[in-house]
Image (tube, rainbow, N blue to C red):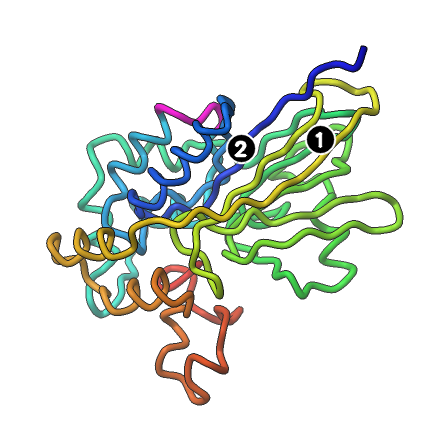
Amino acid sequence: MRQPLDRIALISDVHGNLTALAAVLDDIDARGITRIFNLGDYVGKGPRGREVIDLCRERCEVNILGNWDDFLPDPDRSFDTPTKALAWWLAQLSPGQGEWLRALPFSHDFLMSGRRVRLFHASSDSVHHRVRFDHDEAEFLSMFANTPATGDGPEPTVVGYGDTHDSYYEVDRARRTLFNTGSVGNSMDDPTPVYVILEGVYGSDAEAPFSIQFVRVPYDVDAELAVAREMGMPEYAGYESEIRNGIYRGEMNEPGGPAYHRRPREDAPPASHGS
């Protein structure tokens, strides 16, 4: 008799969007999935980072460091946006939450159906080094490498990450699988929140059925925007552009307009408008 398959929900890049997170968690619960791993970026962009952190600490078995989680509460950070948005988002956090964020692990490794799975936020070497869906072969291979950030041990055959807010799935001829979870709270292009379900035999080094499923979950965007307005969140127009239309705020006023610029550029300042 075949061993029953386990399911893990992977969420990432909630970015203070509590309404989207609640909708995704409801969908996960409705599917009977109890194991949730979070790939980082709990805060920034949206208004309710404090509540997102509290809920993720309660519901997520694994929580991983994101780039916003690292730089927003950094006591040595001196940069802010002209609207003082970073100071506003930081002020929303409860005492100790910033320290909790910065102490999160960089990556998480486990076995599933004979595959070695590694999860991190952005890339194998840093939460601030971004790898896009249109990467080259060298970038693809670098995602499977051991680095000082990931530590030593067997290299993964499956890597999942977030950060870019663009979900995708890719496999090479060596059966290395790279996928991006997309974003729960700030999805680009299609603004509908997206998360991933991994299905297989958790903790097993024996070959068994294995699948990666992407799930889109609609939610009440107007309710989320109403909260942001009520709280007086800075950079509201950029937030509305992103969660209503999937258009990155850094591209709103650039030549060519939003219909031409669909995704964040690599040179967007990571401490101001990073994904």
> Is 233 situated left or right of 151 in this image?
left
125 or 58, nearer to the observer: 58
How many neighbours does mark 2 have within 10 angstroms: few (below 14), some (14-19), or many (20 or more)?
many
- The tag earlier along the polypeptide, 1 or 2, is 2
Q: Which residue is mark 2?
A: 9
Q: Residues within 10 Å of mark 1 (few under 14, many from 20)?
A: few
Using the image as rendered, state which of residue 25 and residue 154 is in the foreground.
25
| Residue depicted at 20% across the width and 67% down the height | 83
Q: Residue at x 35, y 60 (%)?
A: 243
Q: Going 48% across and 39% down the picture, which residue do you hit? A: 11
**Percent position (x, y) of residue 223?**
22, 52
Q: Position of residue 45 (x, y in %)?
A: 31, 56
Indicate yes or no whether the magenta region holds residue 197: no
Residue at which label 1 appears: 152
Which x, y percent locates residue 192? 43, 55
Q: Is residue 8 left or right of residue 76?
A: right
Name the amino acid type tagged 2: Ala
Residue at x-position 37% and y-position 59%: 271
**Quarter of the image with the C terminus in it:** bottom left
Camera-nearest label, 1 or 2:
2
User: Most extreme residue toward the right, as rendered?
Assistant: 173
**Image: magenta residue range:** 58-62
The quarter of the picture where residue 95 lies is top left
Which of the numbered marks, if any, corresponds to residue 173? none
Q: Is residue 156 left or right of residue 133?
A: right
For the view shown, which residue lies furthest in the bottom direction? 255
Residue type, mark 1 in image: Asp
Q: CA distance from mark 1 to mark 2?
A: 26 Å
Callout 2: SS: strand
Look at the image and tell me in which quarter the N terminus lies.
top right
